[in-house]
Image (tube, rainbow, N blue to C red):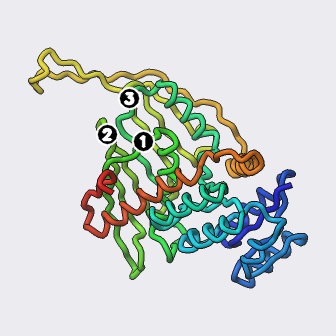
Amino acid sequence: MIGIGLIGYGYWGPNLARVFSALPACRIVGICDLREDRRGRAAQSYRDSIVTSDYKQLLDSPEVQLILIATPVQFHYPLAKKSILAGKDVLVEKPLARTSAEAEEIIRIARESRRIVAVDHTFLYSGAVETMKGILDSGELGEIRYIDCVRVNLGIFQHDVNVIYDLAPHDLSIIDYLIRRDPVTVQAMGIRHENHNVEHLAYMHLEYEDDLIAHFHLNWLAPVKIRRTLIGGTKKMIVYDDLEQSEKIKVYDKGIVIRSDDQDSLNRVRIDYRTGDMVAPRLESREPLEVEAEHILSCVRNRTRPRADGEAGFRVTRILEAAQRSIQRGGAPVSLESD
């Protein structure tokens, strides 16, 4: 029985508590939050757990093996570091840290302490993303040419991070898992309205080797909620709509064929459109967070590497950091290679 300590019972913490408490392989030993109203709700839901405003009670408890960190981003690094040094494994809500230096420090300390670091990239455990991973690994799409992501809604305004740090980790973690490639450059442009102190609308552009590009539209002010990703290959294309109930993944056998008798003359280029069938694969319907929780517990028990480990968290944080730097430079490209 793995003992769980949860730090943060705001927006995401209750979901973590709900899922982990339902699994027979663990129990919620304690929950920490600074706000009295949240502690009251936690105490009502988990009567057999310690509820406290002092996270050190959880770090000092010999009954706790795994710390779940669901706090604002600014506290991820110090809490993860202290938890690891206290001999605990950690699962950190996305993103792993504010900066790549903080993420690297977490990884280094965990490696030296032989502790497990997992990042809560929940979508990696969804049936849709697993299906896409299989399709891309099989080569069915051919060479990937572009990735286009839209993640917008009339959303919860964060005060400690901007819309990129809030929404982009979902899509960045998915793409990192699917293609296992680092971008060469990152560009971003964002804007603040209504006297807000952080960007709430942003566009981010990633360029990879071999002419692959990825584009992200992120917005807290959209009148509708959209969670859609397009992946274009030389053979087939994928449309992933996370809000679809029955057909989240659609694979289109569509594309273009460029023919030319003279490669040096654009006037002789002819583009033919290829249209085939659309297939909607059957997907695993389990809640991704439940699948993730089981996976993390297995990693803690067997001392194995999580799917979304500290290294994955570092790669996402590095891109977020570069995007923020690009915004500060008026949208100028930031090279990850030089970093």
Give, as a three-letter code, the residue at label 1: Arg
Amino acid type of the residue tagged 2 in the rendering:
Glu
Q: Is residue 254 left or right of residue 65?
A: left
User: Do tag 3 and tag 1 residues touch (Cβ < 8 Å)?
Assistant: no
Q: In this view, does 27 lie to the left or right of 231?
A: right
Q: Which percent across, then down, holds residue 215? A: 37, 49
Q: Which amino acid does label 3 sit on?
A: Glu
Which comes before the other along the chain, label 2 or label 3?
3
Question: Regarding mark 3 in the picture, which secondary structure is present there?
Answer: loop
Q: Where is residue 46 in the image (x, y as percent from the top left)?
A: 85, 69
Q: Nearer the viewer, residue 107 or 5?
A: 107
Q: Which of marks 3 and 1 is in front?
A: 1
Q: Label 2: few (<14), some or many (≥20) within 10 Å?
A: few
Q: Dot 3, how many residues are within 10 Å of its Cα: few (below 14), some (14-19), or many (20+)? A: some
Tag of residue 181: 1
Name the disc covering residue 209, or none. 2
| Residue drawn at 20 percent across, 21 percent down | 270
From mark 1 to mark 2, how far is it between C-alphas?
A: 9 Å
Indicate which label's residue lies in the foreground, 2 or 3.
2
Residue under label 3 = 143
Q: Which residue is drawn at 40% across and 53% down?
A: 216
Rendered location of residue 202, percent (x, y): 38, 62
